Each structure stands twice: as structure tokens, then as C-alpha cells.
Image (cartoon, rainbow, N blue to C red):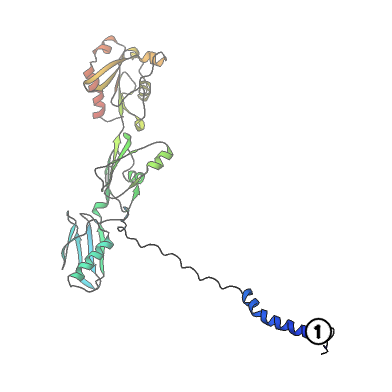
Amino acid sequence: MRQFTIHGFNPAFVLAAVLALATIRPAWSQSASVPPLPAPVPASQPEPQTGPAEQPSRSVLLIGGGDLLKVSVLGVPESDQEVRVDEAGNISLNFLGSVHVAGLTTTAAQDLIAKKLVAGGFFTKPQVSVFSKEYATQGVSVLGEVQKPGVYPLLGSRRLFDVLSLAGGTSAKAGKVVSVTHRDHPEAPLSVMMSNDAGESAKNNIEIFGGDTVLVSRAGVVYVVGDVHRPSGVVMDNGSDMTVLQAIAMAEGTNPTAALSKAKLIRRTASGPKEQPLNLKDMLASRAPDVHLQAEDIIFVPNSAAKSATSRTLEAIVQTATGLVVYGLR
């Protein structure tokens, strides 16, 4: 049989090619199609908390003995009461009688009272309001060497320096140790060291809470008496070290009539006051070491007259130094 060609093409070959493409196209189309995107993975959910409920921050105000509360139920004006928390932490309410609220926040007290009203059958869904008119337990006591010792109101938390400012700042006799006793840990007071260094001061500026007690210690004092320009008690600034010549300088130096080689240092010991000689003349000439002092030391500089230098007994010198305490440090 004769085969025909169209424009140089063999019809049988063209037909075979068309049939082949028809067979291959479905497979090619399926393989070339874009695969479907995978289903999104749901975000993992946090595990439910099974531990104990988080304790309220110490900066949250808690109800305590002596606080004055206003308790009311919305829509029931006759239920309004102003009650003061007794020493046991209880308040006496209409319908309910005694309810213990000490140690609770006002929000927690509202929930407690509402539950008791429902449990007693007095209300179905009461909206209870507890408002603290006076936080008697939220004052901070500032004692010791401050300008104005006393109890100051403190709502929330403040820093140590803020509290000292409320008391007018520290006095000239203040030491470097500040004792802070937290209300919830009265058996473990904290000792904070005051410093002239800015970095140390910022680190020691701890939080103070209502009910805490701040006690500022007194600095060590040395006494300079006798033939000096200004007999006085000299405060050891911030508990720093002090020497005999520094103390003499704080007393504005010795008088021209002073017997420098016959000065004495009186130091308190467990067995009573003891004295030791001080040769101020050699110290001033750098022929003798400058002696380091301790708190409550007494430096006595006698007059150059022989009688004056020997007639002052140890008891008389101590009494003179004690008189500086009676009349105040200068």
C-alpha cells in the first residue's frame, strides 16, 4: 500500500507521535504539579501550672492589725461598715460575725467576704467592696542617729535613702552601720554599711517596706581634753580610722602653754580605764609614730605648769570627757 506524505511529513509517523503524547501527558502533568503545602503545626500550649499559687509581692499592701476598713455590698447601703482590724487580725461584720482578714490584700478580702455571704445564704452574687482608710501597720520606724526619729507612713515600697530623708537625714553622730529589720523576719535584721563611694551607696540602697524598722548606729567618738583650743568629742566620720594627730587637729590644735611631751591616752578596757603616755612633741616632729585611736579613747593634753601636769588624776580626766557627753558634742 502506498504511503502519502504531507509537506514532507509521513502521516503514520505523526499519528504515532500524537498517540504517544496523549499517553505521556497525564503522567507528566501529575509529576509536574506543585505538591500541596503541609498542614500547619499548631503552636505548643504551655503546660498548666500545678505548683502553689504565686505569693503576692512584698510591695503589695496587706491588711494588718489596727487598719481601718470600709466594707460595703453594692446596692445594699445598709451593709456599709467601717471596722478596725483587731490584734488577732479579725473584723466583725453584719451577718457574718468575726472574719479573719489579716495578711490579705483588699481584693482577697473582698472575695473571702463574698464567698461567706453566699455560703450563709444572705446573697446570691454579692459585689463586695473593701477599702482601707488607714494602714496602721504600713508605717516604717526610723530610729537612732537621725534628725527626726519616729514612725513615718509608707504606702508601698521605698528605698533606704528615701526613708532616711523622711526622718530629716542622718545626724552628725551617725555611724556607718544601718540595721534594717523586716516585719516578716524580725529575727534576722540586716546590716547595711553606709559608704561615701557612689557605687557602694547605690548597691546598699535596699528596699524598705511598711512595718520595717530602720536603726542608724552612732559613730565612734574620741575625746580631746586639756590644754587645746577646743576641748571636744570628735566623731569618727563613717567609722573611719583616726589617729591622735587627726583628733588634735579636729580640736583646733594645742595651746602655746600645752605640755606636749606629757600628754596621755586613756583607753577603756574590760578591767577599767588604762592610760599610756603620748609624746605629742615627737609625733609632731615625726620622731614617733602617730597612734591609731579607738572609739571612746580620751586624749589629755596637760598645761606646761608642773602642778597642772601632775595634779589631773585619771578619774578627773575621765569626768571631764564625760562632761562633754552631758553637754553634747561640739
The quarter of the image holding the C terminus is top left
Q: How many marks?
A: 1
* Residue 256 % position (x, y): 36, 15
Please identify the residue farthest to the right as the structure is shown. Answer: 8
* Residue 101 % position (x, y): 21, 59
Judge the density around disc 1: few (<14), some (14-19), many (≥20) Cα neighbours within 10 Å. Answer: few
Please identify the residue farthest to the top as the structure is shown. Answer: 306
* Residue 252 % position (x, y): 37, 23
Q: Residue 45 sits in which quadrant?
A: bottom left
Type of residue at label 1? Answer: Asn
Of the pair 280 and 306, the residue shown nearer to us: 280
Of the pair 76 and 58, the residue shown nearer to us: 58
Please identify the residue farthest to the bottom as the structure is shown. Answer: 1
Disc 1 secondary structure class: loop
Answer left or right for 102 relative to 157: left
Task: List the residue tagged with mark 1.
Answer: 10
Answer left or right for 197 relative to 152: right
Q: Residue at x 27, y 17 (%)?
A: 275
Q: Residue 69 sits in which quadrant?
A: bottom left
* Residue 123 % position (x, y): 21, 73
**Vertical order, 62 against 307 (above or below):** below
Answer left or right for 296 relative to 7: left
Whether residue 171 is visible, yes or no, is: no
Q: Residue 221 sits in which quadrant?
A: top left
Q: Residue at x 71, y 83 (%)?
A: 19
Of the pair 205 and 122, the residue shown nearer to us: 122
